[in-house]
Image (tube, helix red, strand yellow):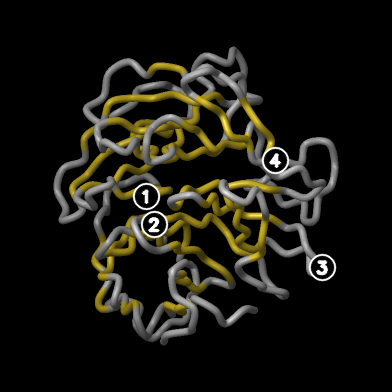
Amino acid sequence: MSRSCLVLLTIFSALRITVLAQIDARMLRQPDVSQTHIAFVYAGDIWVVPKQGGTAERLSSPHGEESMPRFSPDGYHLAFNANYDGGTDIYVVPTSGGLPTRVTYHPGSDRVLDWYPDGQSILLASGMESGRQRFNQFFKVSREGGLPARLPVPYGEFGAISADGKWLADTPGSRDFRTWKRYRGGMASDIWLYNLEDDSATNISHDPANDGQPMWHRNTIYYLSDRGTDQRHNIWAYSLQTKKTRQVTHFSDFDIHFPSIGPSDLVFEARGHLYLLNPSQKYLKF
């Protein structure tokens, strides 16, 4: 594994969950990071911890499972998925805690993907207009709720909006919830750039491997891919200026799962641990 730009956040040194402080469970999942905090899923609930370490506080405790927390651009709210009423819908809650606000009401599954740069709307994936449950599409919905508006993209599983709101980095399909390791068939996903102003699209990954989970950081798109010699899911980066791709992490034994990016850091899970990656740093800090 590469030792550049990586901070290991272990479950019981940087993150101290009070009740389970002596159990190395390694079951932290689906993290996200703001300028000051990290959110993650543990035991079906959402927890929040200061980015520099400390005691993790449980943000949710009702019946039903929560997943995929995503900080708003200002870090004051979290959007997340929850199946409180049978279907999986999107909710928004203050990062400091409080009563969640329900955003979507579709009887099927809605999945939060990203916030729009102004913090007033949420990008989500849903099959509400696909006519079947075999594929999803992208929708934009107000953080206050209301009728979602479908984006002009035929298929959509994971995506992120650029800082100027003009571009969508997306994957039409996804292998992220599958258990088929090292898949190289026709359903392997690619990263696409979609121009929301002129409806043009460009494939920027072009590889038989599985490329997914795109994330914007200035003029770079970070994403998850199992290309490379070890065929393990690692973080890769595509420069919009040079049009070149480079490998960022080098895990050879375990895959990275569900990375997410914040204002200055990228966070992900591997082997049950959380890792924090600052793209601007050139050295390892513990």
Q: Quadrant of residue 271?
A: bottom right
Residue type at mark 1: give it. Answer: Pro
- Amino acid at the residue labelled 4: Asp
Residue 1 disc label:
none
- Element at label 2: strand
Upstream in sequence: badge 2 or badge 1:
2
- The residue lying toward the viewer, choosing from 79 and 4, is 4
Evaluate if marks 2 and 1 touch, with contact meaning CB atoms under 8 Å apart: yes
Quadrant containing the N terminus is: bottom right
Q: Residues within 10 Å of mark 4 (few under 14, many from 20)?
A: many
Disc on res. 69 = 1
Q: How far apart in space, not on screen, are marks 4 and 2 (Cα)?
A: 23 Å
Q: Sequence-wise, which precedes: disc 4 or disc 1?
A: 1
- 1 or 3: tag closer to the N-terminus: 1
Tag in front: 1 or 3: 3
The residue under the point 82% across, 68% down is 229
> Where residue 183 sits in the image (x, y, percent)?
81, 49
* Residue 260 locus on image (x, y percent): 46, 55
Mark 4, residue position: 190
Residue under pointer 2: 32
Q: Residue at x 46, y 17 (%)?
A: 150
Q: Secondary structure at mark 4?
A: loop
Nearer-N-terminus badge (4/3): 4
The CA distance from mark 4 to mark 1 is 24 Å
Q: CA distance from mark 4 to mark 3?
A: 18 Å
Residue 229's label in the rendered image is 3
The earlier-in-sequence mark between 4 and 2 is 2
At label 3, counting other C-alpha atoms closer than 10 Å, the crowd grade (few under 14, some 14-19, many 20 or more) is few
